[in-house]
Amino acid sequence: MKKFVFQLDALYQVKRARKDQLQKEYSEAAALYQAALEKKDALDSALEAESVRYEARAKKGMTAGELLAGSAFFADLQKRRKSAAADAERARRHAEGRQRELLEAFQDIKALEKLQDKQYEAYLAEEGKQETSRIEDMLSFSLSGQAQIPAGG
């Protein structure tokens, strides 16, 4: 009985290795995206808190220099927040790209596994036919050998 060998085993192994690599890359990309979101959220919170503080000081009265400094500070904070939002968007797109590639790798592997199952079923059917043929040959040999032995002796 010959051993079953999947004809596309090399491709299957390459796809599995690629899937493992993509899983690692996706995890890293998702972590970077999460970090970028946290940075953007921290800047959003800082902007909101500074706005409340600035309004409270403005109600008490401010000098022109304080107004100018506050304006420059908010402009810088807005610029950093916009940059963080763009970084988060880039990280999101990168993570989604890795996720799509990972999904494709899973689909490829699933298709190869189904093909392997079909090849294995065909292998078992062929082995069954060969076994049946061997049994029939042994039976016919045994029966033909009995026919040649004289009765009685």
Image: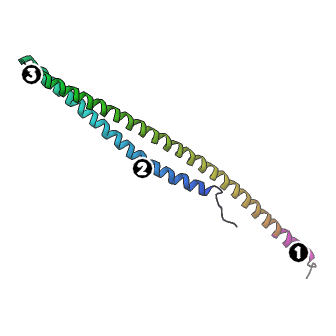
Horizontal side of 122 relative to 72 (left or right) equals right
Identify the residue at the far bottom of this view.
153
- 107 relative position to 73: left or right: right
Q: Amino acid at mark 3?
A: Arg
Q: Secondary structure at mark 3?
A: helix
Q: CA distance from mark 1 to mark 2?
A: 69 Å
Mark before the other along the chain sequence, 2 or 3: 2
Q: Which residues are magenta?
A: 138-153
Tell me the kind of residue under disc 1.
Gln
- Closest to the observer, 92 or 132: 92
At label 1, counting other C-alpha atoms closer than 10 Å, the crowd grade (few under 14, some 14-19, many 20 or more) is: few
Q: Residues within 10 Å of mark 3 (few under 14, many from 20)?
A: few
Q: Residues within 10 Å of mark 2 (few under 14, many from 20)?
A: some
Residue 24 badge: 2
The secondary structure type at the circle numbered 2 is helix
What is the distance, in whole Å, between disc 3 and disc 1 at their CAs? 115 Å
Q: Earlier in the sequence, mark 3 or mark 1?
A: 3
Image coordinates for residue 66, horizontal then vertical, percent: 10, 23
Residue at mark 3: 57
Of the pair 7 and 138, the residue shown nearer to us: 7
Of labels 2 and 3, the one closer to you: 3
Quadrant hosting residue 33:
top left
The percent coordinates of residue 127 (x first, y second) are 72, 61
Query: Which residue lies under the disc numbered 1?
Result: 146
Majority SS type along the magenta span = helix
Quarter occupied by residue 61: top left
Nearer the observer: mark 3 or 1; the answer is 3
Whether residue 44 is situated above or below residue 150 in the rendered picture: above
Which element carries disc 1, helix, strand or loop? helix
